[in-house]
């Protein structure tokens, strides 16, 4: 079962570490960036399932990162996590493409619930996502879903230049059993 990966872009070390610890404890794989420049680089180059983004950052602005992500990855799930709580700030963040907006201070339980909700409704999520931190089937009796893996003979062998058969988007993850972003099972035969 593959872990879901979350990129956390937050300059406050204590807050960032608290978020990273909570996410790791909940079963997520976590990437972290401490400023706008590093956050932009990681947001555009790394594969991840969701971006948690602070707006007030040294060496860059969170809204600029959001715009860059939307330009390069229009369906990438993004949750803004910031101290900017005024109505116009929330509206601007949502209008620029954030999927959710959480104002500091926040409850870790609420943040985890919001992450799960955004991942559930994200077009890039694997079809079997129903459980925190997991991208695959879960244990029967605990929110289980059917196994979406195709037979061994048709395991995904896409190259970075391959395209998803349904959306014609680039296949970005060769380790999983399905092509992202639409989770359509790849029909290419396994090369031996």
Image (cartoon, rainbow, N blue to C red):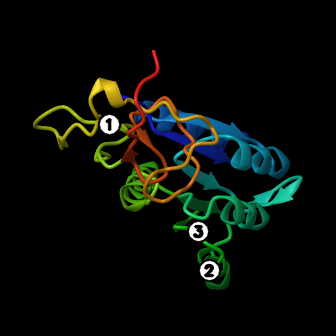
The residue labelled by disc 1 is 136
Which residue is rendered at x = 48% and y = 59% of the image?
A: 167
* Residue lying furthest left: 141
* As drawn, 47 above or below 192: below
x, y percent for residue 83: 67, 64
x, y percent for residue 175: 48, 29
Instruction: Give the structural element (helix, strand or loop) at label 1.
Output: loop
Direction from residue 144 to residue 159 in the image, left or right: right
Of residue 154 and residue 69, the one placed in the foreground of this image is: 154
Direction from residue 111 to residue 141 in the image, left or right: left
The residue labelled by disc 2 is 95
Q: Quadrant of residue 13?
A: top right
Q: Are marks 2 and 3 in contact (CB under 8 Å)?
A: no
First in sequence: mark 2 or mark 1?
Answer: 2
How many C-alpha atoms fall within 10 Å of the one at disc 2: few (<14), some, or many (≥20)?
few
The answer to whether residue 163 shows anywhere in this view is yes
How many C-alpha atoms fall within 10 Å of the one at disc 3: few (<14), some, or many (≥20)?
many
The residue labelled by disc 3 is 98
* Residue lying furthest top: 192
Which residue is rendered at x = 46% and y = 39% of the image?
A: 4
Of residue 23 and residue 192, the one placed in the foreground of this image is: 192
Instruction: Give the structural element (helix, strand or loop) at label 3.
Output: loop
């Amino acid at each position: 079962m593959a872990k879901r990966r979350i990129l956390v872009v937050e300059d406050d070390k204590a807050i960032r570490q608290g978020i990273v610890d909570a996410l790791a404890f909940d079963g997520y794989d976590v990437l972290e960036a401490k400023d706008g420049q590093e956050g932009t680089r990681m947001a555009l180059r790394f594969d991840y399932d969701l971006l948690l983004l602070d707006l007030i950052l040294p060496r860059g602005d969170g809204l600029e990162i959001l715009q860059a992500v939307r330009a390069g990855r229009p369906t990438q799930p993004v949750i803004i996590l910031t101290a900017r709580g005024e109505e116009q700030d929330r509206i601007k963040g949502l209008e620029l493409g954030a999927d959710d907006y959480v104002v500091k201070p926040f409850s870790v339980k609420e943040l985890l619930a919001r992450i799960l909700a955004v991942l559930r409704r994200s077009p890039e999520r694997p079809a079997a996502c129903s459980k925190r931190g997991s991208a695959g089937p879960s244990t029967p009796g605990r929110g289980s879903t059917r196994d979406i893996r195709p037979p061994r003979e048709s395991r995904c062998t896409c190259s970075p230049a391959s395209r998803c058969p349904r959306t014609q988007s680039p296949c970005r993850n060769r380790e999983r059993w399905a092509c992202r972003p639409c989770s359509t099972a790849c029909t290419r035969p396994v090369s031996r």
